[in-house]
Image (cartoon, helix red, strand yellow):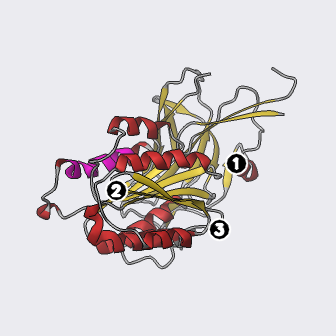
Amino acid sequence: MRTTILFVGTGLLLVAAALAGDEKTPPQRLPDVKPPAPGPSTPRNTTAAPRRKATADEPADEAATRTPSIRVDTNLVLINVTVTDPLNRFVTGLESEHFKLFEDKVEQRIATFASEDAPLSVGLVFDASGSMGAKLQKARLAAAQFFKTANPEDEFFLVQFNDKPEMTHPFTTNTEEIQNRLTFTQAKGRTALLDGIYMALNHMKKARNTRKAILVLSDGGDNSSRYTESEIKNLVREADVQIYAIGIFEPVSARSRSAEELAGPGLLNEIAEQTGGRHFPVENLNDLPDVAAKIGIELRNQYVIGYVPNTVNRDGKYRRVQVKINQPRGLPPLRPFWRQGYYAPAQ
């Protein structure tokens, strides 16, 4: 059997296989993924129903291993979806019938559905510019709290940036190695945030896990990068990576910042949302560890929805994706988060 696998955006997987020779009302239970001693502000999970690993047309073992069971010229697009309630708690236990999925405004038939905690490849992009001086210790604690949500099969790398980015530690399964490197980080220089994201996306090509994410810890906008904002935005639309960002900002009333720093929240938010991730602005440094733990838990509480596009044109164009919730009875209004689209293959 001959198999070709093309990756087309975060959580999006295009698979083609050919046979050889052929041409707070809600009911709540204990969360399925338990955070490691979260602080009081860390949201808990809302469970809609007993959680299951996989349903629909593809068994759980095939969904996990991507075995070549799909017939000739069949394209399967996979999308990671996070669902929250009005209190920003993660909602688990939903089934495929609770979702509607659209590509370019045309509803698609859901072919596969899973809600398992698959291994992750994660890059930490850590701001070491001069303005981070008083915030470094809390930022280190945030990274440590994020690593506590890791699974044994996860792998991590560290990119630090100030005037320019540096690959401080390549992929490793030992989070203590990365935390030891952060211990010696010193705050100095300007902020090459975009270059740091570019380096992380480039290194992510070496990831061994299908699910990939980048966590950015920064306190402001970019003032030292070679790559432009539009170049990075185009790059993240094509990448197979979810981007989460923690923006460490001064209170609005106390801000006396440059134009680049004032633009920082908008920049981080736009980059994260394109990938199906999220931006969490933080003004109180004491909230950093809880926010980082929340992101780690969110990555463990995602649904993976697969569909075969109604129309398959190999034209390399961008396809816009929309996810809607069929509201379950007895639960408050739910909100989904997903990647906004992907690029179709060019051939």
Q: Residue furthest right?
A: 21
Q: Nearer the viewer, mark 2 or mark 3?
A: 2
- Mark 1 residue crowding within 10 angstroms, few (<14) / some (14–19) / many (20+): some
Extent of the magenta region: 260-271
Residue 189 position, x and y percent, is 29, 58
Numbered disc total: 3
Whether residue 153 is visible here, answered yes or no, is yes
Sequence order check, earlier mark of 1 and 3: 1
Please state which amino acid type lies under the numbered disc 3: Pro
* Mark 1 residue element: helix
Give the numbered dot on residue 63: 1
Q: Which numbered disc covers residue 152?
A: 3
Quadrant in the picture for residue 288: bottom left
Please tell me which of labels 2 and 1 falls first in the chain.
Answer: 1
Instruction: Mark yes or no: residue 326 visible.
Output: no
In what quadrant of the picture does the N terminus appear?
top right
Residue 162, label in figure: 2
Mark sitting on residue 242: none
The percent position of residue 44, horizontal first and vertical second, equals 45, 70
Tell me if label 2 and label 1 are in contact, CB under 8 Å: no
